Image (spheres, rainbow, N blue to C red):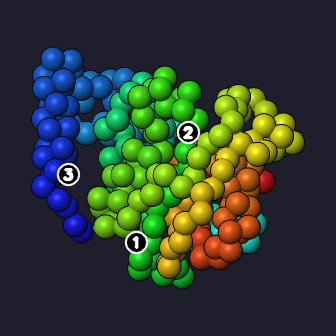
Protein backbone atom coordinates (compact mmCIF):
# COMPACT_ATOMS: atom_id res chain seq x y z
CA UNK A 1 0.00 0.00 0.00
CA UNK A 2 1.32 3.39 -0.94
CA UNK A 3 0.11 6.45 0.87
CA UNK A 4 1.35 9.93 0.27
CA UNK A 5 1.25 12.50 3.06
CA UNK A 6 -1.64 14.43 1.56
CA UNK A 7 -3.83 11.32 1.30
CA UNK A 8 -3.02 10.39 4.88
CA UNK A 9 -3.88 13.84 6.21
CA UNK A 10 -7.07 13.85 4.17
CA UNK A 11 -8.07 10.41 5.47
CA UNK A 12 -7.34 11.55 9.05
CA UNK A 13 -9.42 14.72 8.64
CA UNK A 14 -12.24 12.68 7.15
CA UNK A 15 -12.33 10.39 10.20
CA UNK A 16 -12.04 13.36 12.57
CA UNK A 17 -14.90 15.15 10.84
CA UNK A 18 -16.99 11.99 11.01
CA UNK A 19 -16.25 11.59 14.73
CA UNK A 20 -17.27 15.19 15.43
CA UNK A 21 -20.48 14.67 13.46
CA UNK A 22 -21.13 11.54 15.50
CA UNK A 23 -20.78 13.48 18.72
CA UNK A 24 -23.30 16.04 17.54
CA UNK A 25 -25.66 13.62 15.83
CA UNK A 26 -26.02 10.16 17.31
CA UNK A 27 -24.55 7.50 15.03
CA UNK A 28 -27.26 5.55 13.23
CA UNK A 29 -27.37 2.23 11.42
CA UNK A 30 -27.49 2.74 7.66
CA UNK A 31 -29.85 -0.21 7.35
CA UNK A 32 -32.55 0.33 9.99
CA UNK A 33 -31.74 3.70 11.56
CA UNK A 34 -31.27 2.37 15.10
CA UNK A 35 -28.61 3.94 17.34
CA UNK A 36 -25.17 2.28 17.18
CA UNK A 37 -21.86 2.93 18.88
CA UNK A 38 -19.48 2.44 15.98
CA UNK A 39 -19.34 1.63 12.30
CA UNK A 40 -22.30 2.19 10.02
CA UNK A 41 -24.39 -0.90 10.58
CA UNK A 42 -26.05 -2.64 13.54
CA UNK A 43 -25.49 -6.28 14.48
CA UNK A 44 -28.82 -7.35 13.00
CA UNK A 45 -28.51 -5.58 9.65
CA UNK A 46 -24.92 -6.70 9.10
CA UNK A 47 -26.19 -10.27 8.94
CA UNK A 48 -28.81 -9.27 6.42
CA UNK A 49 -26.56 -9.72 3.38
CA UNK A 50 -26.46 -12.32 0.63
CA UNK A 51 -22.92 -13.05 -0.51
CA UNK A 52 -22.11 -14.20 -4.01
CA UNK A 53 -19.47 -16.68 -5.08
CA UNK A 54 -15.84 -15.84 -5.88
CA UNK A 55 -16.36 -17.03 -9.45
CA UNK A 56 -17.58 -14.85 -12.29
CA UNK A 57 -21.34 -14.77 -12.13
CA UNK A 58 -21.75 -13.62 -15.68
CA UNK A 59 -19.98 -12.70 -18.90
CA UNK A 60 -20.58 -9.45 -20.74
CA UNK A 61 -18.94 -8.94 -24.15
CA UNK A 62 -16.55 -11.74 -23.24
CA UNK A 63 -15.50 -10.12 -19.95
CA UNK A 64 -16.22 -11.74 -16.58
CA UNK A 65 -18.54 -10.00 -14.15
CA UNK A 66 -17.99 -10.35 -10.41
CA UNK A 67 -20.39 -9.03 -7.79
CA UNK A 68 -19.90 -9.23 -4.05
CA UNK A 69 -23.50 -9.26 -2.82
CA UNK A 70 -27.03 -9.44 -4.01
CA UNK A 71 -28.67 -6.04 -3.98
CA UNK A 72 -30.74 -6.71 -0.87
CA UNK A 73 -31.02 -5.67 2.77
CA UNK A 74 -28.25 -3.60 4.27
CA UNK A 75 -26.22 -3.46 1.02
CA UNK A 76 -29.14 -1.80 -0.72
CA UNK A 77 -29.26 0.81 2.05
CA UNK A 78 -25.50 1.33 1.91
CA UNK A 79 -25.55 2.04 -1.82
CA UNK A 80 -28.58 4.29 -1.45
CA UNK A 81 -27.03 6.17 1.44
CA UNK A 82 -23.84 6.86 -0.51
CA UNK A 83 -25.70 7.82 -3.65
CA UNK A 84 -28.47 10.00 -2.31
CA UNK A 85 -27.74 10.91 1.31
CA UNK A 86 -24.15 12.17 0.97
CA UNK A 87 -23.04 9.51 3.42
CA UNK A 88 -19.55 9.22 1.98
CA UNK A 89 -18.24 7.02 4.77
CA UNK A 90 -20.23 4.22 3.08
CA UNK A 91 -17.64 4.31 0.29
CA UNK A 92 -14.98 3.12 2.77
CA UNK A 93 -17.14 0.17 3.81
CA UNK A 94 -18.05 -0.68 0.23
CA UNK A 95 -14.36 -0.65 -0.69
CA UNK A 96 -13.52 -2.88 2.25
CA UNK A 97 -16.10 -5.44 1.09
CA UNK A 98 -14.73 -5.31 -2.45
CA UNK A 99 -11.16 -5.67 -1.17
CA UNK A 100 -12.02 -8.71 0.96
CA UNK A 101 -13.85 -10.18 -2.01
CA UNK A 102 -11.14 -9.77 -4.67
CA UNK A 103 -8.54 -11.30 -2.34
CA UNK A 104 -10.48 -14.53 -2.84
CA UNK A 105 -10.66 -14.46 -6.63
CA UNK A 106 -8.10 -17.04 -7.66
CA UNK A 107 -8.11 -17.03 -11.46
CA UNK A 108 -7.35 -13.33 -12.10
CA UNK A 109 -3.92 -11.69 -12.11
CA UNK A 110 -4.31 -8.42 -10.23
CA UNK A 111 -0.72 -7.23 -10.61
CA UNK A 112 -0.65 -3.80 -12.23
CA UNK A 113 -4.43 -3.51 -12.08
CA UNK A 114 -6.12 -0.24 -12.92
CA UNK A 115 -9.51 0.75 -11.50
CA UNK A 116 -11.85 2.60 -13.84
CA UNK A 117 -15.07 3.67 -12.11
CA UNK A 118 -18.25 3.90 -14.14
CA UNK A 119 -18.62 7.62 -14.53
CA UNK A 120 -21.59 9.76 -13.74
CA UNK A 121 -22.93 12.54 -15.94
CA UNK A 122 -21.74 16.01 -14.90
CA UNK A 123 -25.35 16.93 -14.13
CA UNK A 124 -25.42 14.25 -11.41
CA UNK A 125 -21.91 15.16 -10.34
CA UNK A 126 -22.90 18.77 -9.69
CA UNK A 127 -26.10 17.69 -7.98
CA UNK A 128 -24.27 15.36 -5.56
CA UNK A 129 -20.88 17.03 -5.54
CA UNK A 130 -19.19 13.69 -6.16
CA UNK A 131 -19.37 10.49 -8.16
CA UNK A 132 -20.39 7.74 -5.74
CA UNK A 133 -18.62 5.00 -7.70
CA UNK A 134 -15.43 7.04 -7.92
CA UNK A 135 -15.54 7.47 -4.12
CA UNK A 136 -15.65 3.68 -3.73
CA UNK A 137 -12.85 3.33 -6.30
CA UNK A 138 -10.68 5.82 -4.45
CA UNK A 139 -11.01 3.90 -1.21
CA UNK A 140 -10.37 0.61 -3.00
CA UNK A 141 -7.30 2.13 -4.59
CA UNK A 142 -5.97 3.08 -1.13
CA UNK A 143 -6.58 -0.45 0.19
CA UNK A 144 -5.09 -2.30 -2.76
CA UNK A 145 -2.46 0.09 -4.10
CA UNK A 146 -4.08 -0.22 -7.55
CA UNK A 147 -4.07 2.90 -9.66
CA UNK A 148 -7.35 4.58 -10.47
CA UNK A 149 -8.27 6.54 -13.56
CA UNK A 150 -11.40 8.66 -13.52
CA UNK A 151 -10.62 10.67 -16.64
CA UNK A 152 -10.82 8.30 -19.58
CA UNK A 153 -14.40 7.09 -19.30
CA UNK A 154 -16.86 9.92 -19.78
CA UNK A 155 -20.63 9.85 -19.45
CA UNK A 156 -21.65 12.02 -22.35
CA UNK A 157 -25.41 11.71 -22.26
CA UNK A 158 -27.65 12.32 -19.29
CA UNK A 159 -29.78 9.20 -18.90
CA UNK A 160 -32.96 8.70 -16.95
CA UNK A 161 -32.81 6.61 -13.77
CA UNK A 162 -33.22 2.98 -14.77
CA UNK A 163 -35.04 1.57 -11.74
CA UNK A 164 -38.28 0.74 -13.48
CA UNK A 165 -37.04 -0.03 -16.97
CA UNK A 166 -36.89 -3.44 -18.56
CA UNK A 167 -33.85 -4.81 -20.39
CA UNK A 168 -34.67 -3.32 -23.81
CA UNK A 169 -35.55 0.09 -22.37
CA UNK A 170 -32.29 0.14 -20.42
CA UNK A 171 -30.25 -0.79 -23.47
CA UNK A 172 -31.85 2.03 -25.42
CA UNK A 173 -31.38 4.41 -22.48
CA UNK A 174 -27.61 3.89 -22.16
CA UNK A 175 -26.72 3.37 -25.83
CA UNK A 176 -24.14 5.94 -26.96
CA UNK A 177 -24.11 7.52 -23.51
CA UNK A 178 -20.43 6.88 -22.76
CA UNK A 179 -17.20 7.86 -24.43
CA UNK A 180 -13.82 6.27 -23.88
CA UNK A 181 -10.72 8.41 -24.49
CA UNK A 182 -7.60 6.92 -26.04
CA UNK A 183 -5.23 5.61 -23.38
CA UNK A 184 -2.94 2.69 -22.83
CA UNK A 185 -2.55 0.30 -19.94
CA UNK A 186 -0.54 -2.89 -19.59
CA UNK A 187 -2.34 -5.11 -17.12
CA UNK A 188 -5.80 -5.74 -15.79
CA UNK A 189 -8.56 -3.16 -16.02
CA UNK A 190 -11.18 -3.29 -13.28
CA UNK A 191 -14.36 -1.66 -14.46
CA UNK A 192 -16.04 -0.74 -11.20
CA UNK A 193 -19.70 -0.06 -10.51
CA UNK A 194 -21.93 -0.15 -7.46
CA UNK A 195 -24.68 -2.28 -8.97
CA UNK A 196 -25.40 -4.42 -11.99
CA UNK A 197 -28.98 -4.98 -13.00
CA UNK A 198 -29.52 -6.03 -16.59
CA UNK A 199 -25.90 -5.35 -17.46
CA UNK A 200 -26.82 -2.80 -20.13
CA UNK A 201 -24.47 -0.13 -18.78
CA UNK A 202 -21.57 -2.57 -18.52
CA UNK A 203 -22.40 -3.90 -21.97
CA UNK A 204 -22.19 -0.42 -23.47
CA UNK A 205 -18.93 0.39 -21.71
CA UNK A 206 -17.17 -2.94 -22.27
CA UNK A 207 -17.90 -2.68 -26.00
CA UNK A 208 -15.96 0.61 -26.00
CA UNK A 209 -12.99 -1.10 -24.34
CA UNK A 210 -13.23 -3.94 -26.81
CA UNK A 211 -13.21 -1.54 -29.77
CA UNK A 212 -10.01 0.00 -28.41
CA UNK A 213 -8.38 -3.43 -28.26
CA UNK A 214 -8.45 -4.06 -24.50
CA UNK A 215 -8.82 -7.73 -23.66
CA UNK A 216 -7.70 -7.96 -20.02
CA UNK A 217 -10.70 -6.58 -18.18
CA UNK A 218 -13.12 -7.60 -15.46
CA UNK A 219 -16.33 -5.96 -14.33
CA UNK A 220 -16.52 -5.66 -10.57
CA UNK A 221 -19.65 -4.48 -8.81
CA UNK A 222 -20.55 -4.30 -5.16
CA UNK A 223 -23.97 -5.74 -5.85
CA UNK A 224 -26.24 -7.32 -8.38
CA UNK A 225 -29.99 -7.41 -8.50
CA UNK A 226 -31.72 -10.75 -8.45
CA UNK A 227 -33.48 -9.89 -11.69
CA UNK A 228 -30.13 -9.84 -13.48
CA UNK A 229 -30.15 -12.19 -16.46
ZN1 LIG B 1 -29.68 -1.88 11.52
| Residue 193 horizontal/vertical position (percent) | 55, 50
Q: Is mark 3 within 8 Å of ligand 1?
A: no
**Secondary structure at numbered mark 3:** helix
In primary-sequence order, the first of circles 2 and 1 is 1
Residue drawn at (39%, 44%), measured in percent from left and top? Answer: 135
- Density class for disc 3 (Cα within 10 Å; few <14, some 14-19, many ≥20) is few
**Tally of numbered tags:** 3
| Residue 144 horizontal/vertical position (percent) | 33, 66
| Numbered badge on residue 120 | 2
Q: CA separation, marks 1 and 3?
A: 23 Å
Q: Nearer the viewer, residue 145 or 46?
A: 145
| Residue 187 in view of the camera | yes
| Residue 77 horizontal/vertical position (percent) | 48, 33
Q: Quadrant of the N terminus?
A: bottom left
**Which is more foreground, mark 1 or mark 3?**
3
Residue at mark 1:
103
| Numbered badge on residue 7 | 3
Drawn side of residue 37 relative to residue 159, left or right: left
Q: Nearer the viewer, residue 221 or 113?
A: 113
- Density class for disc 2 (Cα within 10 Å; few <14, some 14-19, many ≥20) is many
Q: Is mark 2 within 8 Å of ligand 1?
A: no
Amino acid sequence: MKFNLFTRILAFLKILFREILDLVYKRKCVGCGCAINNGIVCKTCVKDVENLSYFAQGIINGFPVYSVFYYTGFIKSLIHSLKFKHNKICACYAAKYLFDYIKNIKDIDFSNALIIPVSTHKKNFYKRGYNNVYEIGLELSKLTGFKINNDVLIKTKYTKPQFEMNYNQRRKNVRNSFYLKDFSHEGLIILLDDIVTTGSTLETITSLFKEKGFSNLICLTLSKTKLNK
